[in-house]
Structure formats: structure tokens, C-alpha cells
Amino acid sequence: VLMGSASPDVATYHGALAGRHRLLRLPRRIEPADAAGAGGRGLAEAQTVDMRTELREGNMRLFSRALTGELDACLRGGSQALLFLNRRGSASYLQCRSCGLGLRCGRCDVPMTYHRDAGRLLCHYCGNRRATPKQCPRCGSFKLSYYGAGTQAVVDEVSAQFPDATVLRWDRDATTRPAAHQELLERFRAREAQVLVGTQMIAKGLDFPSVTLVGIISADVGLHVPDYRTGERAFQLLCQVAGRAGRGELPGRVIVQTYQPDNYAIKAAAAQDFQGFYQQEVRYRREQGSPPFSRVIRLLYPHTNRAASEREALRVSEHLRRGRDSWGYSDIELLGPMPAYPSRVRGRYRWQLILRGVRPRRLLDGVSMPPEWVVDVDPVGLA
């Protein structure tokens, strides 16, 4: 098995450094210049923009002044740009300004996203749809406002500021047919459009030599998910999308917009500095006892009744604690029970327990788990 990545999984890289895998390094980006013997150009130049400063200085738009200026220069120079926002739709949620009610999915504990093209609210977990209300269902007020932004809002902003630019959008909403992905990429490669707006799809290994600008609209999306791998996922995604700029003969620029410019994952991703990120992340993991310094098992119990889900989680938690204490497995941590994230999906409430230790499976081997429980050994994530 050959595993390759510019931003490896932290646990896998730690294993490679420990000798469990053979580690091979490719320190330079392969570019056309290499073939001529001139050496690679290196990474695109990155600039991090503090959006708090933009707000304080009166810029209320979706694009910072730096991104607007770079996009203008890119388009006037005849190059192409990628604009990345890992959120679909026109607005991330709808809220009443009178009573504060946020419209959430009736089956999942998440806000519904407004999609202007469809004129509806959509749940991105279960696909539930509902018409956009004209007044608040709780207080009857007509003061409903849209907050947050999705890829459609980015397209609208480009069209408003650069009306002559041709824009393509690449996300799940815009590419519903099997062949739509390839058709869109071919159109952009043929330079039928100057700007490509998309979600994480545009971060995955695309090679467009004419792309000289990458704009990351909000680097903060996903940073607040309760999961020990949140920082790692943010770094990987941002680093990958930043790497799409400057892959041809012209140098690249990356504009990273964020409300958390001092976040270690965002700073490392803007610099495309995996080693710097890894050293910080592995230090946090060691302090917290998270993988690769332990192993994790996630126990999840879903039920249509909230109280029943909680009761079962408490019962099994107590059962596991008694077993752990009686067998002397003091090195196994039992975290929870706690609501999962999201706490409700597709009409089922979810409670979870986390086992953490060097060999947490020893505890499960000595007990019988009810068949309704979902047991995930070494889970990819906790959310």
C-alpha cells in the first residue's frame, strides 16, 4: 500500500516517524519549470485577512478589500480564480429578529439552510425540505432575516462586483447529474469561465495552470465541531485548496479570510506548513491523551424517544464502569454519556459513550452490548 498526501493524517504520520511505515518525502512541488531544469517555483504567496478589522473599518461585504483587489487584478490579467467556501446554499440559516427563533429541521437538531434557487429551506443531514415562511411560526413576526453565506451568495457577490466575469459554481446542488462534474471541469479548463466557486470539491487535486488566485471566503467553517480532529480537518482542507494556486508559469496568490487569524490550524494552512501544524497538533494530542497516544471506541445509541435514549446511555455507562472497576482496567477512560453531535438525526435522538485508552477493547470484550448500539472502533471522527 502506498499512501500519499501533502497533508497526511496526524496518526499515520506519527506512525511513520515511529517506524511503523516507511516514510518518503517529496519536498518540492512538481512544475513545468522542473522539466527545464530550473527548479520548482514553490508555493503560492498567502495573505491572511482578519475579517474583524474589515468590519471595524466599515467593510460589511462578503469579500475583504484585499480579496476584491486581488480578484480584480486576476481578472484584468486574464487569469482564473477559485473561491472556496465549505457551505452550500445562499444563507446558512433563517432567524426571527423579534423572538430569536432559528428555523431548524424537524427531524435533525441542525438549522435548515436557505437555497434561493429552489426557494426552500433544506436540511443538509436528512434532505428534509420546507417552503420558506413569510412570518415567524412562533411569534408571527414578519422580521425574518438570513444569516451566514453559502456558495450561491459568493456567486452573487462576484456577479455584483464584477458583472462582466463568467462564474461557475461547483457543489452538490449545482452538479446533480453524474456527468455534470466532468462537464463543469472541462468548461473551466477550456476557460469558458474566469471564476470557479465551490465547496470542498475544488480542493481535491485539481490542476489548472491558469489559476493564479485562490480566495478562502471563511476559513472558520467547521472549526467549532466537538471532535479532536477538528483542527486537523481544517488544516487539511485549507492547505489543499490553497495548493490550487500558482501551478502554472505565473505565480499564485492565496487570500485567507478569517475571524480567528491566530488559530494554529489556519496559520499553518495559509503557509502550507505541515511540519509546523503537526508539531503543534501532536503536542495537543499528547496533552489530551487523544490518538495516536491512545485508541478510541465510540458507542452510539439512537432512539426516537429522547428520554429513552438518555436512560439507555446512562444504564450502559454504569454497566461499563462497574466492569472496568471490577476488572482493574484503570487505564481505560469512560467519557460520557453525552449527546452526540448533532444530537438528533433523521428523527432519532443520539447519545454516546467514548472509551479511550491504550487497549479499550478489553473492556468491551468482557461485556455484552445490546444490538441496538453502534460500536465504532477507531472512529474516523466523533461528529
Image (cartoon, rainbow, N blue to C red):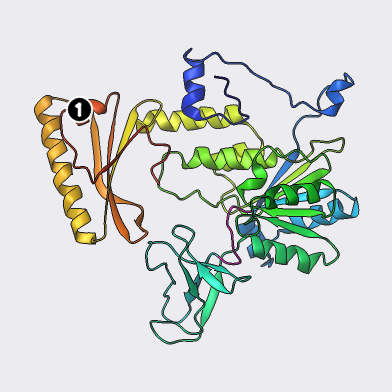
Q: Residue furthest front?
A: 178
User: Which residue occupies 34% across, 27% down?
Assistant: 294
Q: Is residue 280 above or below residue 305?
A: above
User: Which residue occupies 61% across, 47% down?
Assistant: 200
Q: Quadrant of the N terminus?
A: top right
Which image quarter: residue 58? bottom right
User: Which residue occupies 61% across, 54% down?
Assistant: 218
Amino acid marked by disc 1: Asp
Magenta highlight: main SS: loop
Q: Nearer the viewer, residue 108 or 58?
A: 108
Q: Is residue 301 above or below residue 29?
A: below
Q: Is residue 248 above or below residue 133?
A: above
Q: Which residue is mark 1?
A: 365
Q: Is residue 53 covered in magenta?
A: no
Q: Nearer the viewer, residue 181 or 105?
A: 181
Find residue 289 and report its horizontal and vertical position in percent.
35, 30
User: Which residue occupies 37% across, 64% down?
Assistant: 107
Find residue 62 and report its horizontal and vertical position in percent.
67, 63
Q: Nearer the viewer, residue 52 or 206?
A: 206
Find residue 82 and report its horizontal and vertical position in percent.
74, 49
Which image quarter: residue 270? top right
Where are the magenta residues, as a range? 85-91
**Total labels drawn:** 1
